[in-house]
Image (spheres, rainbow, N blue to C red):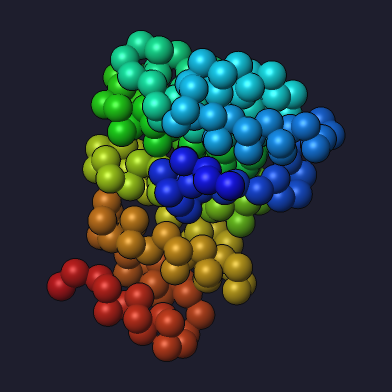
Amino acid sequence: MFLPQRSRFTGLAASEGTGMSEMEVTREDVAGRKRAGELALLDTARALATARAIGHPWYRCQALSMAAEYLSGPERERALMSALAAAWEQDEVNRIVTVSAWPIRGLADAGSEAAGGQVAKLVRLAQTEPHHLRRSHALRALAAAVGEHPLLLERVVPALAAALLGGYGPRIDRCIRDSFDLVVRAKPELAWALAMHHKASRRQSLLLAQIPQ
C-alpha cells in the first residue's frame, strides 16, 4: 500500500529496534502507524485521530509527524508538538532523541520558531546518554533531520562528533561514515579528527578526501 510520508522521512529510524520502551509494542501500534500514513494524504482529520489513538509513544510520535506533513500553520505545529510530547513519554534517552527527529524535521522545514529550542533541548538530553554508540546514533538521526537547516545543524554536530570520538569499533566507524557529510557541511574543522578516528582503511582514505582543502 502507498505510504505518502515514506520519502519525507528517509534516513530516520522507523523500526522499533531494541529497548525502545518498557511499554509493550502491540500489533495495533504498528497497524495504527501504517493506517495514519495511508490516511494522511486523503483525510488529515482521520489520520490525526488514528495517530492519537496509538498507545505506544514511538509509533504515536511517528504517526502524528506523518499526519502533520499535510497540515499547515498552527494546526501543523500543534500536531508536531504533540508528536514531540509523545517521544518524551519514553524511558530511554536515545529512543527519545531518535524518534524526535521525525517531528523536528517537520518543525525545521516549516520554519517554526520552536525548532531551535527543541533541538537544543534534545542535544542536552542526548549528552546524558553514557553509551557512546547509542548517543551517536541518536544524534546522527537528529542531525539528519535538520541537515538542510545550517543553523540547526550547527547545534547538533559538535555533540555528535564528541560522541563518535568517544567510541571505538566497526559500528562507530560506520556511524562516522554515515555522519561525515553532515559534519563537513556544518563544522568542517571537526572532520579531520573524525576521519583519523576511523580505522585505517580505504574507507578512511575516502573520508579524508572529502575534507575541504
Q: Residue at x 47, y 28 (%)?
A: 42
Does residue 16 sit above or below 167 in this rendering? above
137 left or right of 195 in image: right
Q: Position of residue 164 (x, y in %)?
A: 50, 59
- Residue 85 in the image, given as x and y percentages of width and height: 57, 19
For residue 209, side relative to residue 90 (left or right): left
Depth order, front residue of 162/36: 36
**Residue drawn at point x = 40 percent, y = 27 percent:** 70
Of the pair 185 and 35, the residue shown nearer to us: 35
Where is the C terminus found, in terms of image quarters? bottom left
What residue is at 26 percent from the left and 26 percent from the top? 111
- Classify residue 146 by image quadrant: top left
Residue at the far bottom in the pictured view: 202
Report whether residue 160 is seen. Answer: no
Would residue 148 be visible to someone looking at this image? Answer: yes
Residue at 42% x, 88% y is: 202
Name the outermost residue toward the left: 213
Residue 27 lies, with reference to residue 140, above or below; the image says above
Residue 48 x %, y %: 55, 19
From the top left corner, tell me how far across and down residue 211 is, in percent. Answer: 25, 71
106 relative to 150 in the view: left or right: right
